[in-house]
Image: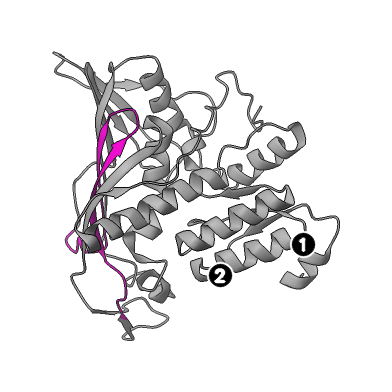
């Protein structure tokens, strides 16, 4: 087994996958880039916008690539919803809603402390899945409004390993926000660790001038995609596109490796991840400052996977 230092010193390693906790994401990425390695990181890109910007700036200076989870938007679920939108099935998209409602992680996770520290909370934990999917479906975000809060200042771990220990809550645990997309659509996103009794809200819905699409859980690759057009009384389930509907974690760095070899852009890009990182902070800033946050970044919308994709390929 390599130490981090040994891994970075090995000249045969071209791409480093960074699965550390959020507080270490930027440091490990910067070290990898300094060592001449491309790097793919677990979400989020960094704890702060400054960390994310430093990583992208160094990658550009070194002529290297940065990729970042989540890659679940490459799954058949989101890709099928994307094709429905691109085909005009629901007309022009005008709005979206997205909900991630849970009671938090202290009742099941063996080490839940970091979910309530800087870089944690429901927005930074699960927001990347929802925001990345929304950017894939609707394009980049222009501006954000938001309100944040926390139901508790302290939580008690009830999972077995640390049962009874207390966690101080240092981050908002309920984040509600609005997004204005560059295409004119308006989105609503709520992420929460304060839904102690559960929730029946949908994952993502996209509303168009001619109908609505029900988008599956963006934390998965498959799921059910349904739509209903104006005047219809029943939902129609759309067959999933060929591709990746099973749990395919790792498809993001695989796509990045394909892209490095072929010279094309990779889909789960650092620029996309930075746009998502800025948006997550935008919700918090808008709440803290009581005014709309104007996004400074944008990004290219990731190219959809080819429709005739053969299994275990990406081009």
Of all residues, the one furthest to the bottom in this rendering is 165
Near mark 2 (Cα within 10 A), the count class, few <14, some 14-19 or many ≥20, is few
Q: Residue at x 39, y 31 (%)?
A: 137
Is residue 196 in the magenta section? Answer: yes
Identify the residue shown where x is 29% and y is 54%: 283
In which quarter of the view is residue 289 placed?
Answer: bottom left
Residue 215, located in which quarter of the rendered image?
top left
Left or right of 224, for residue 176 = left
Asked if residue 89 is positioned above or below residue 107 in the image, the reply reads: above
> Going by the image, does 208 lie left or right of 15?
left
> Which structural element holds mark 1?
loop
Q: Where residue 286 appears, x then y in whole percent?
A: 25, 56
267 vs 88, left or right, is: right
Residue 251, horizontal then vertical, whole percent? 60, 42
Q: Earlier in the sequence, mark 2 or mark 1?
A: 2
Which image quadrant for residue 188?
top left
302 shown above or below 288: above
Quarter holding the C terminus is: top right
Q: Is residue 16 above or below residue 260?
A: below
In magenta stretch: residue 215:
no
- Using the image as rendered, state which of residue 49 and residue 311 is in the foreground: 49
Q: Residue furthest right?
A: 11
Depth check: give the residue in front, 185 or 100.
185
Magenta residues, start to end? 168-197
Is there any visible trace of residue 192 in the rendered image?
A: yes
Q: What residue would you read off at disc 1?
A: 35
Please, what secondary structure does the residue beneath circle 2 have?
Answer: helix
The N terminus, quarter of image: bottom right
């Amino acid at each position: 087994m390599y130490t981090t230092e040994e891994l970075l010193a090995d000249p045969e390693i071209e791409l480093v996958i960074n699965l550390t906790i959020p507080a270490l994401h930027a440091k490990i990425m910067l070290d990898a880039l300094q060592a001449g390695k491309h790097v793919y990181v677990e979400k989020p890109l960094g704890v702060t916008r400054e960390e994310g910007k430093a990583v992208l700036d160094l990658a550009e200076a070194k002529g290297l690539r940065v990729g970042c989870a989540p890659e679940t938007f490459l799954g058949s679920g989101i890709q099928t919803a994307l094709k429905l939108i691109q085909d005009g099935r629901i007309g022009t998209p005008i709005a979206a809603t997205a909900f991630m409602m849970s009671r938090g992680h202290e009742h099941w996770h063996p080490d839940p402390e970091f979910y309530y520290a800087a870089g944690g909370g429901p927005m930074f934990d699960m927001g990347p899945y929802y925001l990345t999917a929304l950017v894939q479906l609707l394009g980049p975000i222009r501006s954000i409004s938001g309100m944040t809060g926390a139901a508790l200042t302290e939580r008690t771990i009830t999972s077995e390993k640390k049962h009874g220990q207390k966690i101080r809550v240092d981050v908002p645990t309920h984040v509600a926000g609005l997004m204005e997309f560059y295409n004119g659509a308006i989105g609503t996103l709520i992420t929460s660790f304060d839904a102690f009794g559960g929730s029946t809200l949908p994952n993502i819905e996209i509303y168009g001038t001619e109908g609505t699409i029900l988008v599956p859980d963006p934390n998965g690759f498959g799921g059910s995609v349904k739509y209903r057009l104006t005047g219809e009384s029943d939902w129609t389930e759309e067959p999933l596109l060929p591709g990746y509907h099973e749990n395919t974690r790792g498809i993001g760095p695989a796509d990045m490796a394909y892209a490095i070899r072929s010279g094309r852009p990779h889909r789960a890009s650092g620029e996309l991840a930075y746009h998502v990182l800025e948006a997550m902070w935008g919700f918090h800033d808008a709440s803290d400052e009581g005014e709309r946050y104007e996004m400074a970044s944008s990004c290219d919308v990731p190219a959809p996977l080819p429709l005739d994709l053969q299994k275990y390929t990406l081009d």
